Amino acid sequence: MTPSLSDPAQWPDLYGDVLYRHAFFRLRDEMLAEELVQETFLAALKSRQRFAGKSSEKTWLIGILKHKIVDHIRKAVREQPQKEVFQELDEIELDSFDGKGHWKFDVGRWSDPDNALEQHQFWSVLEACIARLPPRMASLFILREIDGLDSASICKELELSSTNNLWTLLSRMRMRLRQCLELQWFERGKHQENKT
Amino acid sequence: MINCKQATAMASQQLDRELSLRQRLSLKLHLLICRYCRNYRRQLRFLHRIAPRLQTFIEEHSDIHLPPQRKESIRKSLEEQE
């Protein structure tokens, strides 16, 4: 027996928003996100017979969307000169370290980070900090840290020649993100009550 | 002896790959004497650990929607193709 799918005419209402949020977060481009969601539904319709029913309908659709997003990122990353990519991100190191490679400022402890996880506002700050990364680079970060792809798969999927470059980029993005989160959340919390 | 800039790069790479024995030792030595880098590494690991959970938050975002006109046009093309 073939696993049953819902009526495709209902997909946009059932899954349109979830897919769109997923795509928009990764691409930061409304038009593009809409288009990829549309393509995803159409591709899903064509390959309906292959739906194994092992995962939920939603997971199946998101899987198709993820492939489309990676295809797009691959093209985008290839079009951007490597030099530019590195320049966009090396400021964080200049801001953080002196000529001898020592911290220019104190890196203190964060108070009760696990408590932050319970708060809606924390996640929205984290999202905003990721949105501040250079868009194409943020996609790499998201593949690695949110989707949990390992660096070998990322290089393979995106046809990047050097894992070393990827590691350097990831390191700089993590540094930026750490700093953003510190300023927007952990430091802020010291001055105002953020426990709701 | 590695400096903080090198130590932070290694702390990040440790999340992506296995460091060589030599690198592990230099990092360990640096962390023994550098409180800032210890804090830094702890914070990177925290972010690495919790980041996947952002996915749920994104999906449940109530204020972002696929525009109704787009939903309608997708529905039409799905019905045509069926």
Image (cartoon, coloured by chain):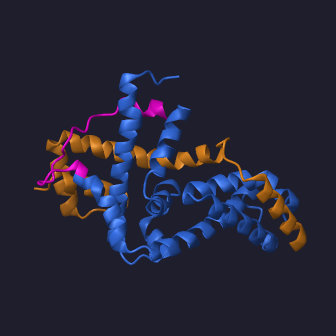
Chain colours: A blue, B orange
A25 in the magenta segment: no
Horizontal arrangement in the rendering, residue A185 relative to residue A120 (left or right): left
Q: Is residue A186 above or below residue A94?
A: above
The answer to whether residue B40 is visible is: yes
Horizontal arrangement in the rendering, residue B22 relative to residue B69 (left or right): left
Residue closer to the observer: B3 or B61? B61
Choose top left, top right, bottom left or bottom right for residue A23: bottom right
Horizontal arrangement in the rendering, residue A172 relative to residue A21 (left or right): left
What x and y, as percent, mark residue A156?
A: 47, 75
The answer to whether residue B82 is visible is: no
Q: In this view, does A1 lie above or below B8?
A: below
Residue closer to the observer: A195 or B29? A195
Image quadrant containing the N terminus of chain A: bottom right
For image coordinates 35% across by 31% down, the residue present is A187
What x and y, as percent, mark residue A85?
A: 37, 67
A114 in the magenta segment: yes
For image coordinates 36% across by 73% down, the residue present is A82
Choose top left, top right, bottom left or bottom right for residue A45: bottom right
For image coordinates 28% across by 56% down, the residue present is A91
Q: Is the magenta stretch mostly helix, strand or loop?
A: loop
Write the start and end of the magenta stretch as one range.
A95-117
Number of on-image labels? 0
What x and y, as percent, mark residue A68?
A: 63, 69
For image coordinates 24% across by 50% down, the residue present is A95
Horizontal arrangement in the rendering, residue A99 relative to residue A67 (left or right): left
What x and y, as percent, mark residue A52?
A: 76, 66
